[in-house]
Amino acid sequence: MSEGIEKPTIIYIYDAICGWCYGFSPVMKTIYEKYKDKFDFQVLSGGMILGDRVAPIAQMRDVIKNSYKRVEETAGVKFGDKFINEAVEEGTMIMSSEKPSIALSVFKTYFPQKAVLFASDLQFALNYDGLDLNDDNTYKSIIKKYKIPEGEFISKLNDEEFRQLAYYDVALSRQLQVTGYPAAFIKTPDMEFFMIAKGYANLETMELRIQNVIKEAGLIL
C-alpha cells in the first residue's frame, strides 16, 4: 500500500451469541493476519438477540444441540463441554447480544484494528469455556492479554454512551441489509460495497472472493 492511498476495508458483521460465527472465527482471524497490512478491518455487532428475543439458554437448547455438531464438522471448531454439557444443560444463562456488543464498542476505543481478535475471544469464552457474556467478570479475564486497564474497561462497559455505540453498530449492520450471521463485505475507498460472506464460508472460498473483488474493483494494495 503506497503512502497516502486510503485502504479498502473488510467489514465483518457477527454476533457473539451466533454459533456459525464461532465456526467462522478461525477463518476471519486468518484473513485478518494475512491482509491486515493491505486492508483496514471493521467489526460490527449484528444484534441477533435483543429486546423480546432475549431469553434463557434453555429456550434455545434444542436448536443448539441440533446444530453444534454440524458447525463442528463444517468449520473444524470444537464446542466446549462447559458450554454444551453445563451451560446449555443447566439452562439458566441468559442469551443476549447486548453486553458483548457493548464490550466490542468499548474495545474498539483501545484497539480498533484488533477487533477481529477480540470478537473471537468473546465467542471462545461462551462457546468453549461456557462463560456468561452478561457477567462483567468474564471480560476481566479476556482483556488481560490486551493490557487494558480493568476498572476503566468495566466502567465503560456499564456506561450508556457505549451502549448507544453498540446499538449504532447494530443499526449499521442493518443498513447493510444483513439479516443473518456471519457476513462480510469489502468497502472500497470509493464507497463501493462487495459482499464476500453471507453465512459461513471456508478460508479457500473467502480468499477467492477477496481476490475477485480486488480484480473487479481495481484495488491498489
Image (cartoon, rainbow, N blue to C red):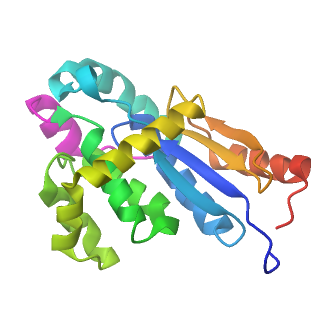
The image shows residue 50 at horizontal and vertical percentages of 29, 29
Q: Is residue 82 magenta?
A: yes
Q: In the rendered view, tell whether residue 12 sits above or below residue 72.
A: below
Say left or right for 140 vs 68. Answer: left
Q: Quadrant of residue 17?
A: top left
Residue pushed farthest front? 161
Could you say where residue 166 lies in the image, as x and y percent from the top left? Answer: 37, 46
Above or below, comparing residue 195 to residue 140 in the picture: above
Residue 173 visible: yes
Q: Is residue 118 left or right of residue 1?
A: left
- Residue depicted at 29% across the width and 47% down the height: 163
What's the residue at 21%, 41% (across, down)? 83
Q: Please tell me whether residue 72 belongs to the stretch shown in magenta.
A: no
From the image, which quarter does the N terminus lie in? bottom right
Task: Name the quadrant containing residue 70.
Answer: top left
- Indicate the quadrant containing the C terminus: top left, top right, bottom left or bottom right: bottom right
Which residue is painted at 90% across and 46% down in the image? Answer: 216
Q: Is residue 125 visible in this depiction of the protein?
A: no
Q: Residue at x 73, y 51 (%)?
A: 207
| Along the viewing direction, whichever of 104 and 23 lies nearer the viewer | 104
Q: Which residues are magenta?
A: 77-93
